[in-house]
């Protein structure tokens, strides 16, 4: 029985329509609209320094995979089930030339080629006809990037200007914890809920300032003048706040496929290019993890707090459920939208125009892929691989 009444004027929850999510935005699996778009780009799947001499199991874009690093430093990313009789390579042994299955000892190279079959005649005379399903991997900025898409559409891994131009004393540091999401590495909701939040600068003055107290610097409590514009690879937002004859101009960006280009919300450094880049890895439809790489001047220096920071230094995971009710942050607001938000129940308002622009851009790219094209930002020539941003915190004289 359909009890939904579109003409109801009472506002009763009794007449709510069955909820629907926009699958173009939220789906991440192979063969889905969103998943096929995401598969046209490289994604960080691990922090390189976390990989030890045993295989690592991980999930990315809804696929369970095994990542390993040989003693010689080459990475391999393979389907977990051994192509012989299916035991998991999680129990495999990492060797100089690849990963050896624990069950019958088949040895696979980082590109899945079968190199040895110790139980077969002659050590595997037909071994060339077997291949463990695999994906290409590259290490950059302390992160391990993987390409999970069609091999003939593999773009070059982009270089990012904020991570390429270092001042004396700076180095690159990588991290795999969910900055802005409460301290847990893996957040239990769809990745797009977090990504589009970057184009929602208005919530900073409410959630992070007036509702839960000052979570960033005091200047951010002021409701900014906000503008949005398309950028070459995404959407750019400028937020202007004025104080003491100065103009605080903050520029944040999102870029395909999952990049958050957000200057330090503690504004530790003005008038210099954005220092960290974050990638929102869709783990599956209902989980994500943020990988970050940034310029630092000391070890452990990613996103430093200013010395006079007045907000809470308590870590999210140390707070009780009631404390989080009383002082919610990004984690609560975004996970609070549910594992996958219901777009059919939203009422976008004027403050959501950045969100609307981002969704339009993403849907457009889904369409391009569905029609056989290459989405924005996929480049196939190393000479075109440099990506530049305008994001930053700028302190200027009022004009
Ligand atoms: S199941 Fe892997 S070698 Fe037999
Ligand atoms: Fe936030």
Image (spheres, grey):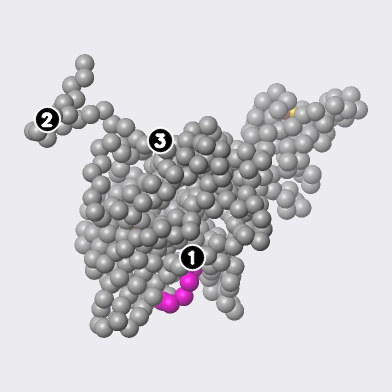
Q: Earlier in the sequence, mark 3 or mark 2?
A: 2
Asked whether the viewer can see residue 311, the reply is: no
- In the picture provided, is 120 more to the left or to the right than 98? right
Q: Identify the residue position indicated by label 1 in the image.
A: 389
Out of 389 and 206, give the one closest to the viewer.
389
Split into quadrants, the picture shows ligand 1 in the one at: top right
Q: Identify the residue position indicated by label 3 in the image.
A: 23
Give the residues in magenta: 270-275
Q: Which residue is drawn at 39% across and 72% down?
A: 393
- Which image quadrant is residue 76 in? top right
Q: Where is residue 197 in the image (x, y as percent from the top left)?
A: 35, 53
Q: Which of marks 2 and 1 is nearer the N terminus?
A: 2
Q: Identify the residue position indicated by label 2 in the image.
A: 8
Q: Residue at x 38, y 47 (%)?
A: 359
Q: Which of marks 1 and 3 is nearer the N terminus?
A: 3
Q: Is residue 153 above or below residue 172?
A: above
């Amino acid at each position: 029985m359909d009890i939904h009444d579109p003409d109801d004027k009472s506002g009763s929850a009794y007449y709510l329509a069955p909820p629907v999510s926009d699958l173009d935005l939220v789906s991440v699996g192979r063969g889905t609209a969103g998943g096929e778009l995401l598969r046209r780009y490289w994604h960080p799947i691990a922090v390189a320094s976390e990989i030890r001499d045993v295989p690592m199991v991980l999930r990315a874009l809804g696929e369970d995979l095994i990542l390993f690093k040989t003693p010689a430093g080459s990475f391999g990313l393979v389907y977990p089930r051994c192509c012989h009789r299916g035991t998991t390579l999680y129990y495999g042994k990492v060797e100089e030339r690849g990963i050896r299955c624990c069950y019958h000892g088949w040895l696979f190279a980082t590109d899945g080629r079968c190199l040895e079959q110790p139980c077969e005649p002659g050590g595997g005379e037909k071994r060339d006809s077997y291949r463990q399903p695999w994906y290409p991997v590259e290490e950059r900025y302390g992160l391990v990037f993987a390409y999970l898409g069609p091999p003939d559409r593999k773009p070059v891994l982009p270089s990012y200007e904020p991570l390429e131009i270092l001042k004396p004393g700076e180095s690159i540091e990588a991290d795999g914890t969910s900055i802005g999401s409460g301290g847990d590495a893996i957040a239990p909701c769809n990745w797009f809920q977090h990504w589009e939040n970057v184009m929602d600068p208005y919530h900073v003055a409410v959630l992070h300032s007036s509702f839960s107290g000052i979570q960033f610097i005091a200047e951010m409590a002021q409701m900014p003048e906000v503008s949005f514009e398309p950028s070459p690879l995404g959407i750019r937002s400028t937020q202007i706040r004025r104080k003491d004859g100065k103009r605080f101009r903050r520029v944040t960006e999102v870029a395909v496929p999952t990049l958050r280009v957000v200057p330090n919300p503690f504004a530790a450094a003005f008038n210099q290019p954005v220092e960290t880049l974050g990638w929102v890895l869709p783990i599956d439809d209902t989980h994500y993890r943020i990988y970050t790489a940034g310029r630092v001047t000391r070890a452990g220096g990613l996103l430093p707090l200013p010395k006079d920071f007045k907000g809470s230094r308590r870590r999210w995971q140390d707070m009780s459920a009631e404390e989080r009710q009383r002082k919610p942050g990004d984690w609560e607001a975004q996970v609070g939208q549910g594992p996958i938000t219901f777009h059919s129940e939203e009422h976008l308002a004027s403050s959501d125009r950045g969100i609307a622009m981002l969704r339009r851009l993403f849907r457009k790219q889904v369409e391009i892929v569905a029609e056989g094209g290459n989405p924005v930002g996929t480049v196939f020539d190393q000479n075109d691989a440099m990506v530049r941003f305008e994001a930053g915190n700028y302190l200027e004289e009022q004009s």
